[in-house]
Image (cartoon, rainbow, N blue to C red):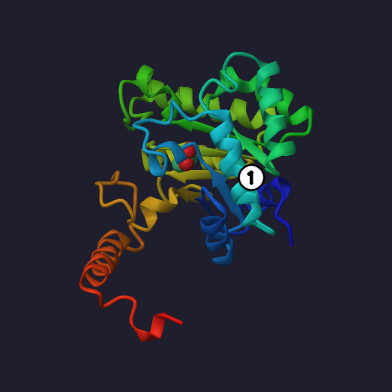
Amino acid sequence: MKWTAAKIKALKGERKIAMLTAYDALTASLVEDAGIPAVLVGDSLGMAVLGYETTLPVSMEEMLHHTAAVSRGITNALIIADMPFMSYQPSVALALENAGRFLKEARADAVKIEGGAFRAEMIESLVENGVPVLGHIGLTPQSVKEMGGYKVQGKTSEQARQLMDDAMAVEQAGAFALVLECVPAELGEMISNALAIPTIGIGAGAGCDGQVLVLTDLLGVSGKPAPKFVKKFATLHPLIAEALASYKTEVESGAFPSDEHQY
Ligand code: KIV
């Protein structure tokens, strides 16, 4: 069964939603084979695999290239393309044009954009024109420079009220679900209870309707410290390092290839 935005939305109250990022056909097929219904081609791509320090340099062309690769690895999961910095902020018209490119050129099923009430008109227009939208509020990494770093959001009652208003506005505008990033667990639960659409938390507590993590964080691939909200379900970095070191040793000693691996 092909997952659609409407089907993901209908999971609210039925079961918790597991979402993960993927950046290419290989990782996408691993995620889908695990039965995960929604794959986000996050602009975390920039930091997770492209070597950028923030998500800001990620371009439309890079996102299209990786979203198309993810699409080739997916049969049924919902494919959500993250619209990169300045591919939608300047105008609704640009957002429509670039969202259209994700659906037409890269076979995405939906797009994600960052921002709350001030994005309502844009979300409404995308949805009216046939583009399902995943909202994203709380810590919005494309605003890292304005926020002054990657910090927990919504800690004061005024900020929490603003985030609640933002969540309501994103729902009202027609988003099928909402990512809540780095907010106190209590606020994550309050927003989740107030909305009819599912919330997908990342550092937003167990009260959310679903969770999303960056695949390379979950697998422990990088060896770098991860934020508090990351649970490493595997620690692959030392295993990969050991395998690569053994390869080097065996090539240099002549132990590889042995009879078994030659014709
Ligand atoms: O870019 C990304 O991967 C994201 C998620 C972590 C929500 O925005």
**In the image, is 169 to the left or to the right of 245?**
right
Q: Nearer the viewer, residue 258 or 116?
A: 258
Considering the numbered disc 1 on the image, is that residue within a helix, a strand or a loop? helix
Q: Quadrant of the N terminus?
A: bottom right
- 10 sits to left or right of 21: right
Q: Is residue 216 left or right of residue 134?
A: left
Q: Is residue 66 left or right of residue 243?
A: right
Mark 1 highlights which residue?
68
Q: Position of residue 41 (x, y in %)?
A: 55, 43
To which quarter of the image does residue 194 belong? top right
Asked whether the viewer can see residue 235, the reply is: no
**Does residue 259 appear anywhere in the picture?**
yes
Residue closest to the eye, 136 or 12: 136
Q: Residue 94: where, in percent of width, then height?
A: 66, 18
When the figure is inspected, residue 205 is found, relative to residue 149, above or below; the finding is: below
- What amino acid type is highlighted by mark number 1? Ala
Name the residue: 54% across, 20% down. 86
Residue furthest to the front in view is 263
| The one of 70 and 214 positioned closer to us in this rendering | 70
Residue 73 in the image: x percent, y percent? 62, 57
Q: Residues within 10 Å of mark 1 (few under 14, many from 20)?
A: many
Residue at image point 22% right, 68% down? 252
In the image, residue 161 above or below residue 65: above
Q: Residue at x 72, y 47 (%)?
A: 6
Residue 49, image x, y percentages: 41, 44
> Quick check: is the Cβ at mark 1 less than 8 Å away from ligand 1?
no
Count of residue discs: 1
* Quarter assignment of residue 174: top right
Query: As drawn, which residue projects farthest toward the top?
Result: 90
Residue at the outermost right position: 129
